[in-house]
Amino acid sequence: MPTTLIQSGRIIDGTGRNSFDGHVLIRDDTIADVIPSGNAPPQADEVIDARGHAVCPGFIDMHSHADWLLPLHDHHNLLACLPEQGITTVVAGNCGFSPAPFNPATTPEFPAAMDLLLERPLDATWRTMGQFLDTLDQTGPVVNIAELVGHSTIRLACARTRRGVLIRKELAACLDSVRRSFDEGACGLSLGLGYDPGMYSPLEEIEAFCRVASEYGRPVTVHLKALSVLSPTYPLMTLKAHNLLALQEMIDIAEKTRVTLQLSHLVFVGRRSWGSSRKALKLIEDACSRGVDVMFDAFPYTCGNTTINVVLPFWFLARVPQAYRSRVSRMHLKAELEAGFALLGFTYRDFQIMDPAVPGMEDLAGLTMDEVAGRWGMPPFDAFLRLSEESRGSALMLFHTYSGEPGMQEVIERMLSHELCLFETDALIKSTGYPNPAAKGAFPRILGPLVRDRKLFSLEQAVNRATLASAQRFGITDRGMIAQGKAADLVIFDPNTISDVPPGHGRPAGRPAGIVHVFINGAHVVREGTYNSTARHGRVLRI
């Protein structure tokens, strides 16, 4: 079996313990030995000099949507940005949407519901979770993948009731499908309560799903019903901040069902929402003190990707497409959005186009909505609705003011430095358009600007949360740690130079600095920062 020796590096083993100097021997796909410095290193077929560099386990992206790209034959081109920033494993199927189970007989609208996640239509030959994971085995993933089963996907596959309360027979079928998905290897359940159809699910239904996850000892991840102090989800005059209401609802369900709860991308959207971050952390900390198993994840940028229609109220969306042409509906909507933006601290400059999703509009990628309005010679509201209508709600946007903005990083740094925070990208990755910077540099940004420069926490703590702590959260037992017998997922980086290359002056984010080598299951896939393998060395991690 082939051997590789990583010699004379600073080993950060993923446990959170102090780093030490030493050597790591890889044999085939496994870490064969870890040798402290002062001991003679063994012979190997290949030797990599790691002097001046850190050696750590491969990073685990806690919140990925790469499962919608992995079935594509050329996905290694789309997803090369993941290993190039040190990611070797993704946890996918998030926000309630997984590619399986799939039932075209009951869900003809299934592809449309998932459109924002797709690079191009999938040839979905699978029906069950097991068949989907088998497909990925056959295709060969570029990174390791652990797959969640999505609540919204289950609902679309098993129930004809799109919105509202499921009848008893439909709920039973949904819960049976969750159990089968767990039996076939799904690592947990994801909820997307800010998206259709999850947003219409009553709390009793969510509790029933969580009880099944608890029975299996699987975690539940949740995109909360609200991420801002005001939202379309709750009545406007509700006294409590909407995001805190949504958080408390899920904590209550976790406490009742004793399920492991992972709060996805815990962000505070809009300048007026930032002040609720301390109260949110207090709710989480108090729940932990009562024995509730709850953590959260976050990305290190003050912007996040979603669709253009996410800010449109339910009443307007229910009347689309006629509402676009209705003078009364437009007047009502304009007044509501202006009031909402003022209360939340938004402007149209905070909405940046990733992908307009309209042929002929490709040059709009990277522009803000007020810049588009200037090009089109119309007010920003009219430009926003025009793009919403012409893209049929599929335009992808980067929404800014997520837990901060340039020059105001206190809230995002508070979240990222909290001991209950794990790390993610939550990046929708496309071959065209303006990329989410997290797709390129989330983990290098944490290790460089936030750890080395800002000293928010130690390098050992950062690596622990990016590796072993994340693996343990999802029951991944064979990786996330540098130890004999563990999978050889490894990153060699320069702690003095590691950094993202953030966007600026019309330029999108670039390839990160400081990632030198990456191994996935013993295969050397990144050399000198560049992904250089057409082979796929990742594996499907059935739990």
Image (spheres, rainbow, N blue to C red):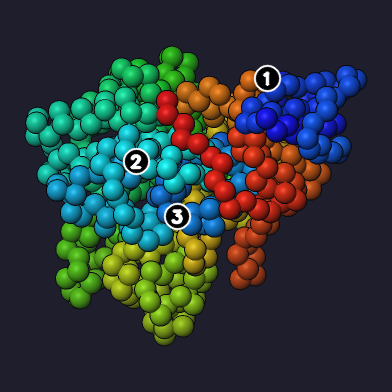
Query: In terms of image quadrants, where is residue 417?
Result: top right
296 shown above or below 290: below
x and y percent of residue 377 in the render? 42, 85
Q: Quadrant of the image for the N terminus?
A: top right
In the picture of the structure, the residue carrying the numbered disc 3 is 73
> Which residue is at 24% across, 52% downward?
110
Q: Is residue 199 visible?
A: no
> Is 169 positioned to the left or the right of 128 in the image?
left
- Secondary structure under tag 2 reads helix
Q: CA distance from mark 1 to mark 3?
A: 34 Å
In the picture of the structure, the residue carrying the numbered disc 2 is 132
In the picture of the structure, the residue carrying the numbered disc 1 is 484
> Which residue is at 34% across, 63% downward?
394
Which disc, if any, is residue 361?
A: none
437 shown above or below 95: below
Foreground pick, 341 / 23: 23
The amino acid type, in three-letter code, at marker 1 is Gln
Q: CA distance from mark 1 to mark 2?
A: 32 Å
x and y percent of residue 539 in the render? 50, 36
Query: In terms of image quadrants, where is residue 334?
Result: bottom left
x and y percent of residue 365 in the render? 49, 71
> Is 513 positioned to the left or the right of 147 in the image?
right
x and y percent of residue 483 in the render? 68, 21
Foreground pick, 335 / 201: 201
Q: Quadrant of the image for the C terminus?
A: top left
